[in-house]
Amino acid sequence: MTLPPSSSPMTSLDLLHSSATPVRITKMETVVADGTNVTALSALVASADQINLLYQVTTTSLGQFVRSINGYGPEGAAGWQYAVNGQIPQEAAANFKLKNGDKLQWFYGNPGISPY
């Protein structure tokens, strides 16, 4: 997916994996232009494609979800989750529309874990 060029503020995207020692995988920025339908999931896909970061998105009866990023996949109840501006939305990433300046963070852990 190619995002339209814009002089508007960027949406920053952090990818974090929590383990015994938290490891920051990468930080990417994606431009979100006014009037576009960039979702949390499409921003991840577009940003990951720009730097050739491996990811896997799975579609289930409940919708799409991120199965793995950079080889880190689900273990037990732990998996990839996302937060926007420090809050965990109660909406699928494929449906959550980003706005200019939003900070999107994908993080790994058990349900209920804080993204910070």
Image (cartoon, rainbow, N blue to C red):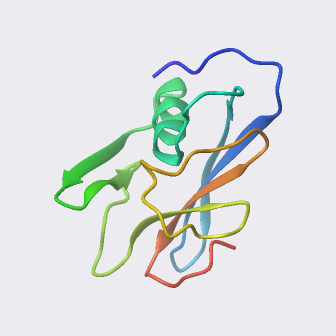
Q: Name the foreground residue: 42 vs 52.
A: 42
Residue 73 drawn at (x, y percent): 32, 61
The residue at the point 77 percent across, 34 percent down is 10
The residue at the point 50 percent across, 70 percent down is 90
Residue extending furthest top?
Answer: 5
Q: Is residue 81 above or below residue 46?
A: below
Q: Is residue 17 left or right of residue 83?
A: left
Q: Is residue 24 left or right of residue 71?
A: right
Residue 16 drawn at (x, y percent): 58, 61
Name the quarter where the N terminus is drawn: top left
Q: Name the foreground residue: 17 vs 13.
A: 13
Q: Name the foreground residue: 81 vs 94.
A: 94
Residue extending furthest bottom?
Answer: 112
Q: Is residue 27 above or below residue 45?
A: below
Q: Is residue 81 above or below residue 53?
A: below
Residue 86 drawn at (x, y percent): 71, 67
The residue at the point 51 percent across, 41 percent down is 44
Residue extending furthest left?
Answer: 61
